[in-house]
């Protein structure tokens, strides 16, 4: 996996994500600026000022597209899709791209990073949130971008639900930590680890987390109660990929999501939320993983199935004291 070294692209991987014990460890994001409603952070939430670089094939980036849709920001924040290619240049634009706020034409996302920080050393990842006015990267940390999308544009964007309400933040944060370790990172530790011991530990942790969520969802519609929160949308990208990607491709094959009555119905419930199906193309997700440039060796052959049946009735409306979001 290539990266930028002092602002120049190198195909030689000098940033190791595999520890000596064979465990996969995800690097922290580098750009960690923050949007605010009043601009006190240096980045004011304004219509037309920001541009999101993403790819639905990446579950971390997928989160940001979900919140962009749920918070009705599609008319305020531009979106450019990227994909991984076999050429070794990392995330690539589908066609030559003029970086917003500049007259610079680029082919690769790493050129945007070098434009923002000419001496940058590190991974080039999606999502990446670009500030058109300052011509720099605001953030490439998905968990923080979705919080910014949730709260910074209140009063600028059309009315929408609050997915991180003050009264539930402690519970949301606790669920997020469990899901991050057991599932968000857990599937990658199963699929990318290089020792049997590391794989076995990751697999046990993954399914312990899924079992706990199955039990949690037996008495409430969503992870933190009757309303959707950020916790649900941080989990969703992994759930929708599980049976068609992680089960075989990442060797997460003890059970499918379809084998969990509550989790599978909950997945359908989330998928059927207005606006979500449009940013949940499972074929694009599979192509990004199973293509020659993806992390799963497959000779570029993308599996045809399975049929997830996400349009089936979910029957979750009566679980707990549920009521629909406006």
Image (tube, rainbow, N blue to C red):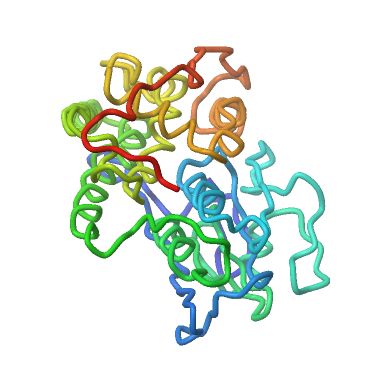
In this picture, is 58 found above or below 250? below
Counting from the top left corner in percent of width and height, residue 197 is at: 19, 29
- Which is nearer the eye, 111 or 196? 111
Residue visible at 52% across and 69% down in the picture: 153
* Image label count: 0
Residue 290 lies, in percent from the top left, at 56, 25
Left or right of 115 in this view: 155: left
Quarter of the figure with residue 72: bottom right
The location of residue 160, given as percent across then percent down, is 49, 56
Q: Quadrant of the rendered structure where residue 266 is?
A: top left
The one nearer the camera, 142 or 65, is 65
Q: Position of residue 308 (x, y in %)?
A: 48, 17
In the displayed structure, does residue 194 sit left or right of residue 84?
A: left
| Residue 238 picture quarter | top left
Q: Nearer the viewer, residue 98 or 163?
A: 163
Question: Residue drawn 82% across and 53% down?
Answer: 96
Please tell me whether residue 172 is drawn above or below residue 41 in the rendered image.
above
Q: Considering only vertical position in the picture, is 255 above or below 156? A: above
């Amino acid at each position: 996996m290539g990266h930028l070294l002092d602002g120049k692209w190198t195909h030689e991987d000098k940033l190791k994500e595999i520890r000596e014990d064979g465990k996969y460890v995800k690097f922290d994001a580098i750009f960690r600026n923050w949007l605010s409603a009043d601009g006190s952070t240096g980045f004011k939430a304004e219509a037309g000022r920001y541009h999101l670089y993403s790819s639905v094939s990446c579950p971390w980036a997928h989160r940001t597209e979900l919140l962009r849709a749920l918070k009705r920001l599609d008319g305020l924040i531009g979106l450019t899709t990227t994909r991984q290619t076999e050429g070794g240049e990392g995330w690539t634009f589908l066609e030559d791209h003029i970086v917003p706020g500049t007259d610079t034409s680029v082919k690769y996302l790493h050129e945007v990073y070098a434009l923002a920080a000419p001496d940058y050393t590190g991974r080039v990842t999606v999502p990446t949130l670009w500030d058109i006015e300052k011509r720099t990267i605001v953030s490439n940390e998905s968990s923080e971008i979705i919080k910014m999308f949730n709260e910074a544009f209140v009063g600028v964007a059309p009315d929408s639900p609050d997915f991180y309400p003050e009264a539930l933040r402690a519970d949301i944060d606790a669920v997020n930590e469990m899901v991050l370790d057991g599932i968000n990172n857990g599937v990658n530790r199963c699929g990318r680890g290089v020792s049997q011991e590391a794989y076995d530990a990751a697999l046990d942790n993954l399914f312990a987390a899924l079992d706990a969520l199955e039990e949690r969802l037996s008495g409430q519609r969503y992870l933190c109660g009757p309303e959707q929160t950020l916790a649900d949308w941080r989990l969703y990208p992994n759930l929708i990929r599980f049976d068609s990607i992680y089960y075989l491709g990442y060797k997460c094959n003890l059970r499918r999501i379809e084998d969990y009555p509550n989790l599978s119905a909950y997945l359908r419930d989330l998928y059927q939320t207005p606006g979500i199906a449009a940013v949940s193309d499972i074929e694009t997700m599979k192509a990004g993983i199973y293509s020659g440039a993806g992390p799963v060796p497959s000779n570029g052959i993308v599996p045809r199935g399975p049929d997830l049946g996400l349009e089936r009735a979910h029957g979750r409306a009566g679980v707990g004291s549920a009521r629909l979001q406006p």
